[in-house]
Amino acid sequence: MKHVAIVGSGLAGSLLACYLGRRGYRVDVYERRSDPRVAGAERGRSINLALSERGIDALRRIGLDEEVLRDALPMRGRMVHPLHGETNFQPYSVSGDRAINSIGRGALNDALLDAASATKGVTIHFDHPLTSLDPETGTLGFADGSQAKADVVLGADGAGSATRGLMMAYAGDSFTETVSFLDYGYKELTIPARDGEFALDPGALHIWPRGTSMMIALPNPDRSFTGTLFWPNSGAGSFASIGSPAAVERHFREQYPDLLELIPNLVDDYRHNPVGLLGTVKCAPWQILGRVALIGDAAHAIVPFYGQGANAAFEDVVELDRCLDATGDDWAEALPRYELGRRENSEAIAEMALANFVEMRDKVADPLFKLGKNVEHTLERLLPGKYVSRYELVSFSTTPYAEVRRRVKRQHQVAGAVAGTLVALAAAAIARRVVR
């Protein structure tokens, strides 16, 4: 029986431990932080997750979906809050009944840690920051001077992965890494319950689009909302330019007037919650020597604007499990196969996530955008199963991300041709009337 070490007990690492433990492996998980179930989550760092079909599918395969979704809140569309005018609801699906699920990162991580801890063969070691790694022997070193050894080492330690850095140090020029940061950051705010009830509609993801910036809010089981500002890091209307209590209140009065009375601790949250980074991580290769590999954000971190970071990481776990099935648990063959199967898909969702930021920030309040969505839903009704929106393919199916990108491109070409034909027919009809 092979011994597997997983670095990182976050969402991907904990789920991976469950999968591998159920395959009969002896699994040791090493986490740099203290147990979050005891220490609690770091202030202002949760970013609520939008769990959708890809993530649910991964949980369903090991019987965790119902337990996890018990604490989730379904959101069936976007509620757009323009600066001027009434709010408007934009459903995610043509039927209006499909939903993505709001769940706190901490709550999901706790549930997965509980499941991993209860899995035979799995042991979790907290307060173990990784400091050294020998890929040839599978020897890991930790900050307290202790060491461990495993047949296979899997880095699930997030965008700032120590495992990735040590792989790069070992592989030298044969290992490439690019980290592309947006000139945007994020900061969390809390919209508490009002008289014991939700202050906003809990069945929607709320968006305040403001052109070069935005705020979103997702519901929580305690009837609060977690709000997240996505603002530029510098320039006018940025985190750098808005710091004093008076400036914070003035900016919200100008840009988010409906939120002022909903966030009683606005200034305190704003001044004390940290600004998080937003970026895309790419690297190659994801594995070396057929015994050390990266998974989830450690291999391909993306910006959060499609709500697919955790869902994509969970899909990595499913793909690795498939590769182990296909190779009879031959890791030297399974790890390269896993990378080959996931790389194109990770690049596709990274691209779509960046594009969706522009859509959420700039377009959702535009009447032409809303008209386009109505046309898209009409095509879906007229061509069921043949024309499916990108959002539905990404969020409500397990169609590979790269295939989603190709299919949507084909659909847009067909839709464009149909629209062109209709315009031409209309023009011809008008011309005939003029001639008469």
Image (tube, rainbow, N blue to C red):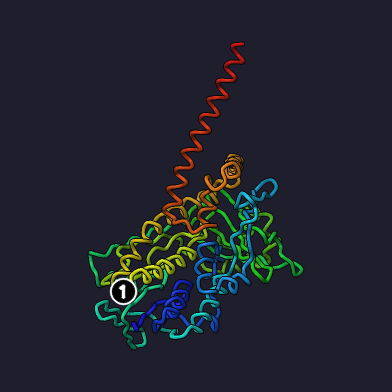
Q: Is residue 241 visible?
A: no
Q: Residue at x 52, y 80 (%)?
A: 115
Q: Which image quadrant: the C terminus?
A: top right
Kind of residue at badge 1? Asp
Name the residue nearer the viewer: 107 or 412. Answer: 412
Q: Position of residue 239 (x, y in %)?
A: 52, 59
Q: Position of residue 362 (x, y in %)?
A: 54, 47
Q: Which image quadrant: the N terminus?
A: bottom left
Left/right of residue 415 with respect to residue 296 in the rendered view:
right
The image shows residue 264, relative to residue 355, as above or below, that is: below
> Disc 1 marks which residue?
330
Q: Residue at x 51, y 38 (%)?
A: 415
Q: Helix or strand or loop: what does disc 1 sit on?
A: loop
Q: Residue at x 33, y 86 (%)?
A: 148
Quarter assignment of residue 432: top right
Name the residue nearer the viewer: 55 or 195. Answer: 55
Q: How many numbered circles are shown?
A: 1
Single out the residue that lies furthest toward the left: 173
Left/right of residue 427 with respect to residue 145 in the rendered view:
right
Density class for disc 1 (Cα within 10 Å; few <14, some 14-19, many ≥20) is few
Q: Is residue 364 visible?
A: yes
Left/right of residue 74 with respect to residue 185 in the rendered view:
right
Q: Position of residue 384 (x, y in %)?
A: 57, 46
The image shows residue 279, relative to residue 161, as above or below, that is: above
Name the residue nearer the viewer: 429 or 260. Answer: 429
Name the residue nearer the viewer: 40 or 344. Answer: 344
Single out the residue that lies furthest toward the top: 436
Q: Position of residue 268 (x, y in %)?
A: 61, 69
